[in-house]
Structures are given as C-alpha cells and as structure tokens.
C-alpha cells in the first residue's frame, strides 16, 4: 500500500492540454474515483501514474518516491484496462501466474498466490479455462485477479465496469468495493458514471477538460457541490434548476424565479454582493414535496406533464411558469398528465449558483 500524490500534473498532446495543473492526494488504502465525461483526461492520468504515458510537467509521488523517471515495473503499480487485456490462448491459471513469473517467484509461491486470489475472487473453478469461454463478469474477475495477485502498492482501474451489462455492473460495484476494503490496497479508478463513483469511492475527483473541479467525499460532492457543473453531473434524476434574479425589498433578500419568489434573507451576508445579478436555483427532486390540494403560502402551483414509473416510485415532470421540475412521488398519489399539483421546496436543501460562473453561492 502507498500514498499517491499528483503535484501540478500537466499533459499536453500537440496543442491540447489534456491534463491541466492537477494536484491531488490519494491516501494510503483509499479508494478514489476520477470522474468525468469522455475526453476529461481520466485515462491519461491513470496511464501517467502507471508509467505508460510521459508527464509533460509536474511530479508523481508513490509513497515517498518521485516516480516520473521510473519504469512501469519499478513503480509497483497494477492497472486493469477496459478491454480486460487477457491472453486469449492462455488458461486463467496462466493469466494469473504470468505477472508472478515475470518477477521470477518460485513455482510454489506462484501456485500459492494464484490459488489464494482465485479463492478471494471466486474463480477457482475457472482456472483451466481460456478467456474466450468466460462470461464478461468472469473475464473481469480474472483481469482483477491478474492485477491483484502480485500485491502491488497501487491498484489502477480504467473504467473497469464499462464493458459489462447493467445487471453485472450492479453486482461488480459492490464486489469491487468489498475487495478493496478486504485487501486494503490504495486504489484509483476512472469512470464516466456518477452512480459508480458514488457507490464505490471514498472520495471523488471531478474533472472537466483536464481541470480538477472538485475533490471531496461522496457526501460533499453530492450534497455540497462547489459549482453547477458538479451538481448537474451527480444524481438521477438530475438536479432541478431554474434561472432567477436577486433583489432587495423591505430589508429582505428575495430570489425572483418567475413562478415564485423565495426569501433568502438568512443568507444575506453571502448574497448581498449579488443583488441585481442573475443566479441559478438548484434543488434535487427528493427535496420537493408534492400535493394534489392547494397549500397556500408554502407551495407553487404546477401541472403534471409526464410520468415515469420505476416500480417503487414515480418520476413526475411538472411544468411551472418558465421552468420544469422533476419530482419523485409514491404510486399511491395517483397522478396523471394534465393534473394540477402544488410543489413545496425544502429550503434547507436549496443551492444558489452564480448565473455566469456557475460557482456555488449557498
């Protein structure tokens, strides 16, 4: 196990700055997600840590060593690729044993480690099979085993669940997290999937075009996003947003949204410098209550436009005056398109973002 520290890391391809002055620390034994859309620089970061890609500028620390000039083998890092990258003509046993043979371990130690990791990953019954005869989930376990069998200091996973179907992904998320906890290895994985990041990681590094936007715990990334970009990229259904303008009246700070006006006076110290400016309200669907009868003074009238039944709950798209909000309701509420409803927002879960920069204000 080892701490990983990326210090002012830069990677340039041609004229494109793929990784832009990235600094972050992964603690010893921590499980960190690098999250971002395609092209955000996720895979490039992992490849630089592994030594498969040169660094344009900055330093990579693994433990107490700067490893920029070390070969991949000298870094003691293992990486699992999206494609699994198994040897198709070798058996599962031979695939698992290969990195140990490269390190010239004794046949007895190789056999012991292969059988040990096979038991942990529940693939002992597959040892004599070749990768082409395995399911996607089985190939994923073998790829993980081949990386883990030599007990590296750092474990890197490049979008490890991308090539699995939805049901397999669900099971493998829990399994990967359990394995990482049991083995205590420092692990970094890349993903474009917010649910994967939230369900597996201790902390999440959110990237946009090579820049680190937020690096925080799962709870903080979800409940306390530092900007609109982060807020909109986490959560399903997506956070509801509405444009508005801040004003002052009778000593109060008000947010005019068109369909309603909110009193934000409790945040006057933060917001007083933004009076007259455009802002964006953000609130997640689960923090909006829905009523089929009028609630005077506390709720906003809307109209149900569409319903999506997920089984245990229903997503309702509600049109307001100039905005549309998605809300979550129980089936017993018996909503239907065209029905008038009243929405009440939980003021303790409202976010206000700057209308230009997207930076969070409250």
Image (cartoon, helix red, strand yellow):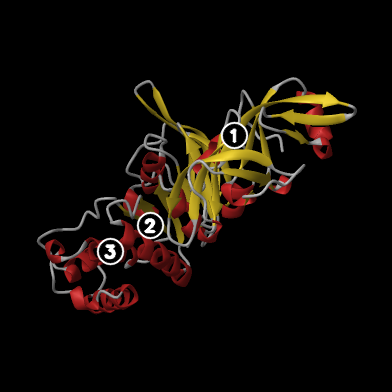
Q: Which residue is drawn at 41% across and 37% down?
A: 41
* Label of residue 320 in the image: 1
Is residue 30 toward the left or the right of residue 281 in the image? left
- Residue 52 drawn above or below residue 17: below
**Cβ atoms at labels 2 and 1 below 8 Å apart:** no
Helix, strand or loop at label 1? It is loop
How far separated are the C-alphas under marks 2 and 3?
Answer: 14 Å
How far separated are the C-alphas under marks 2 and 1?
Answer: 56 Å
User: Which residue in the structure is indicated by mark 3?
Assistant: 146
Marked residue nearer the N-terminal end (2 or 1)? 2
Residue 194: x and y in percent read 46, 48
Q: Which of 234 and 204 is in front in this view?
A: 234
| Residue extending farthest left | 89
Q: Residue at x 34, y 59 (%)?
A: 169
- Residue 127 drawn above or below residue 287: below
Helix, strand or loop at label 2? It is loop
Residue 118: x and y in percent read 28, 75
Q: Is residue 216 visible?
A: no
Residue 182: x and y in percent read 46, 72
Is residue 66 toward the left or the right of residue 278 in the image? left
Q: Is residue 351 visible?
A: yes
Q: Nearer the viewer, residue 324 or 116?
A: 324
* Label of residue 76 in the image: 2
């Amino acid at each position: 196990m080892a701490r990983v520290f990326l210090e002012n890391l830069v990677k340039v391809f041609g004229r494109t700055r793929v990784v832009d002055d990235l600094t972050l620390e992964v603690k010893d034994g921590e499980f960190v997600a690098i999250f971002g859309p395609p092209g955000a620089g996720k895979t490039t970061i992992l490849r630089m840590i592994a030594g498969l890609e040169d660094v344009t500028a900055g330093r990579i620390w693994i433990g107490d060593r700067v490893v920029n000039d070390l070969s991949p083998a000298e870094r003691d890092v293992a990486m699992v690729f999206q494609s699994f990258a198994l040897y198709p003509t070798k058996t599962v046993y031979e695939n698992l044993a290969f990195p140990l043979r490269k390190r010239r371990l004794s046949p007895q130690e190789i056999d012991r480690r292969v059988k040990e990791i096979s038991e942990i990953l529940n693939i002992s019954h597959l040892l004599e099979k070749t990768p082409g005869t395995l399911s996607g989930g089985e190939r994923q376990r073998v790829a993980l085993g081949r990386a883990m069998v030599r007990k590296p200091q750092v474990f890197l996973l490049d979008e490890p669940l991308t090539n699995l179907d939805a049901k397999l992904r669900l099971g493998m998320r829990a399994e990967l997290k359990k394995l990482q906890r049991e083995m205590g290895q420092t692990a970094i994985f890349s993903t474009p999937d917010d649910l994967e990041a939230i369900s597996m990681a201790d902390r999440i590094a959110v990237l946009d075009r090579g820049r680190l936007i937020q690096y925080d715990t799962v709870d903080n990334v979800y409940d306390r996003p530092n900007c609109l970009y982060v807020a909109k990229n986490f959560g399903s259904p997506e956070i509801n947003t509405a444009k508005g303008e801040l004003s002052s009246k009778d000593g109060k700070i008000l947010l005019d949204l068109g369909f309603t006006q909110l009193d934000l006076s409790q945040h006057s110290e933060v917001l007083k410098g933004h009076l007259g400016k455009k802002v964006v309200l953000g609130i997640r669907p689960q923090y909006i209550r829905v009523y089929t009868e009028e609630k005077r003074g506390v709720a906003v009238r809307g109209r149900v436009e569409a319903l999506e039944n997920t089984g245990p709950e229903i997503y309702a798209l509600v049109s307001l005056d100039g905005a549309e909000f998605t809300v979550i309701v129980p089936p017993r509420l018996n909503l239907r398109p065209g029905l008038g409803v009243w929405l009440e927002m939980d003021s303790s879960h409202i976010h206000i973002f700057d209308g230009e920069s997207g930076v969070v204000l409250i």
